[in-house]
Amino acid sequence: MTSPEAPAARTPAATIEPAGTPGHRISGAVWGALAIVYVVWGSTYLGIRVVVETMPPFLSAGARFITAGLILAALIAWRQGPSALKATRAQLASAALVGLLLLLGGNGLVVLAETAVPSGLAALLVAVVPAWVVVLRRASGERPGIGAYSGVLLGLAGLAVLTLPGLSGDVRLWGVLTVVAATVMWSVGSFSSARIPMPANPFTASAYEMVAGGIGCLLVGLVRGEQYGFMLTEVSGRSWLALGYLVVFGSLVAFTAYAWLLHSAPLSLVATYAYVNPVVAVLLGALILNERLTWPIAVGGAVVVAGVGLIVSTERRR
């Protein structure tokens, strides 16, 4: 899955002059990381949908994140030395909590939901994340501004329209509600990442988050009994390819880019991925999986995107 609040880790520079302060220029590295998150995360909804065709949701998600996390940790140790993986107990606990919120609660629930809802609809539902972030900011005492509140109302209205396919029986309502729950979990995890002690190296934090989230997904999968009746020999070739794509691009590349962005860029800018991803996901779902673009999806998606755009444009002017 595919969203954000403030930095995943802090550096002295970020403490002195956050990326979102007036006059701060957005670097080319930030725009490059955003482009990765825009395109790659938009395509992961399609990848997830293909994986769950022949693989159980939580077990496949657990395998994906644990594999990606261990590979990332090995790369960090190789490039920067084993000392780069050091973290205090408090930092490890915080990284584990954020990983569980983002990857078990956020991504894991989306994987489960995509057994019942189209990938494009899931992406459009996830686009409401910036609205939840504004709600969390207000609850913490911040004053986001009237434009942000208007964007929240638009986003929630779009969310209501997007729920219509489930109410009409076109898709399973539990799948729609599961994605909504996932967006809340993802928002809380992203929002919390800057307010608890995290490893100073954002890539190290990302590795620990993926391993913790992956373990959480595996445990939930085992508790749900996903291992019973599951045969590796029955997994299709395209599901294996999709899982490999999710490990390398969705987790190693895009999630690491996202974790770095939470450390290096203002939330208002990072949040823009939330209205680019759905467009990519809907197009790929229609082109490759022949998913139908119904009027509730089209109208609700447009309203959500408009609300997110209003939130982001308001925040960037402040």
Image: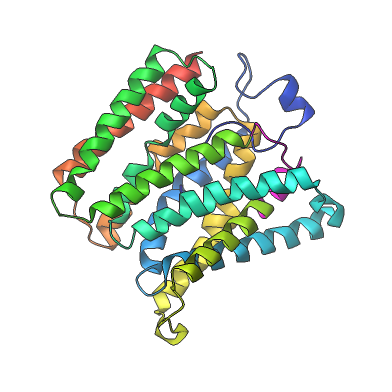
| x 68%, y 58%: residue | 72
The correct choice, above or below, for 255 with respect to 55 in the image is above
Magenta-span inclusion, residue 200: yes
In the displayed structure image, the side of residue 133 where residue 21 appears, left or right:
right
Snapshot quadrant of residue 249: bottom right
Residue 295 % position (x, y): 14, 43
Colour scheme = rainbow
Asked if residue 3 shows in the view, the reply is no
Residue 39 % position (x, y): 45, 47
Taking the view exactly as shown, the residue that stands out farthest to the front is 223
In the displayed structure image, the side of residue 101 where residue 303 appears, left or right:
left
In the displayed structure image, the side of residue 150 where residue 294 appears, left or right:
left
In the displayed structure image, the side of residue 259 where residue 165 appears, left or right:
left
**Residue extent of the magenta highlight:** 194-207
Residue 89 % position (x, y): 78, 47
Residue 92 % position (x, y): 73, 48
The correct choice, above or below, for 81 with respect to 261 in the image is below
The mark total stands at 0
Snapshot quadrant of residue 19: top right
| x 40%, y 84%: residue | 234
Snapshot quadrant of residue 16: top right
Asked if residue 114 shows in the view, the reply is yes
Magenta-span inclusion, residue 87: no
| x 40%, y 83%: residue | 229
